[in-house]
Amino acid sequence: MTFESFELHARIMAGVKSAGYRTPTPIQRRVIPAALSGRDILGLAQTGTGKTAAFVLPILQRLSSGPRGRMRALIVAPTRELAEQIHGEIRMLGQATRLRSATVYGGVGMAPQIRALRGKGRAEIIVACPGRLLDHMNRGHADLSNLEVLVLDEADHMFDMGFLPDVRTIMKQVPTTAQRLLFSATMPEDVRHLANGVLSDPLTAEIGHRKPAQTVTHALYPVERNKKTEMLKHLLREHDPRSALVFTRTKSGAKRLAKQLDSENFFVTSLQGDLSQSKRQKALDGFRRGDYHILVATDIAARGIDVTRISHVINYDVPNTVEAYTHRIGRTGRAERSGEAFTLVTQDDVKMIRSIERSLGTRLERIELEAFAWDDTFDSHHPRKSRPNRTGVGRRGDGRERSERSTRQTDGRTHNRRYRRSRNGPNKQRNTSRAGQQATREA
């Protein structure tokens, strides 16, 4: 199947070709034909599967004919970053259609949003966060009576953020004739109840949403609770990632950890809810450009991060649910690239790790580093792998270069490692930079 088989308008196909899209992803193959026919959709797919284009293309096709200058499609998203990502996709794919789109979310001025909602330059497509949209509705700025398509994206996280009452209030203003599309990475009971209440005979498209991409390598690192930060620094120096996403449970934890890494001269920034919109955007843009090699974020703040080149996801804190683990890991190994997922595991996390392994249907590799692992065995009935600690590279301003990566084959996939194994145990790789050679001599 190709995008031409969807028989999209020529102006939309120009946007598809300009974006470099060639072959539809599984979620796109399932959703786009049904959405073009006007059917309601329940889409379950992990991050990075192409679900944004799966609903944007049918919206552009539907709105390419008909009246202009009024809101005809509404996309509701939980975070500002995700709203901007969707808005960017609309502008890219619909650049030749002359359809207008605008974002509506808090933390910025209302005047431009009011112009997009009711001024002379009204947008046909609005991408909004629930709270600010409801504020506009209460002030009489937003009229949903002409809506033809409603999309609820990342529905599971809208519940996590407490948006359920706002979403239900918004839904009451949507015409019963409007097409409804609901997308979610996971399917908790609240999302299931919402789907049953707002969707009419939907097509359910479930694309591997329970497991991370097969291009991701997982590893667990047992660590004493008070040594987690030092182990994280060690892993960052050893693997020297150019695009790593580090997850913490709390906003304060993300801020504190980023500050600690910055003091050690890592290229790091953080993304968490206490930041202003301008600072959030600056952090995200810097991470996309590669100005920052490490982004420390919470689960909620990370929604909407659309960076296909993330090479490493590191769980500094083990997530509270299996679904959250899957969604975090889905940030790497995207677009058929390989990725690595590291999880720092304390003794308090063992129960959750076992739940994650049961869900994935596989046992994850344990890697113990002598200076960090706790004394008790992780699994008394399984052999353990132990590796000595090695001094790595990659800090800001230290003049060191990346060492060459050796390669190993696992399950038919190639993964990079900063170590080589021989019969006598792991060998240190030769660092060819002047600073690295000096460090070796000093050691």
Image: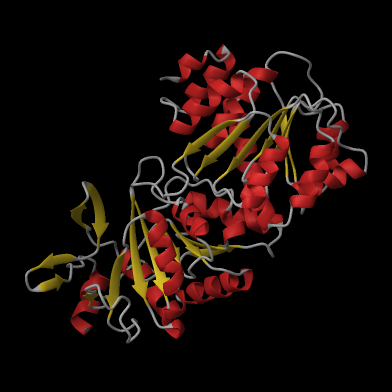
Q: Is residue 95 visible?
A: no
Task: Say above or below: 318 vs 333.
Answer: below
Q: Is residue 314 visible?
A: yes
In the image shown, does 239 or 386 lie closer to the viewer? 386
Which residue is situated farthest in the left direction here?
423
In the image shown, does 90 or 72 lie closer to the viewer? 72
- x then y, percent, for residue 348: 46, 78
Which residue is situated farthest in the bottom direction here?
375
Figure coloring: secondary structure
Q: Residue at x 49, y 59 (%)?
A: 322
Q: Quadrant of residue 137?
A: top right
Q: Is residue 149 left or right of residue 51?
A: right
- x then y, percent, for residue 68: 78, 19
Task: Say above or below: 308 vs 361.
Answer: above
| Figure quadrant of the N terminus | top left
Q: Residue at x 68, y 29 (%)?
A: 200
Which residue is situated farthest in the right direction here?
139
In the image shown, does 258 or 154 lie closer to the viewer? 154
Q: Residue at x 42, y 49 (%)?
A: 211
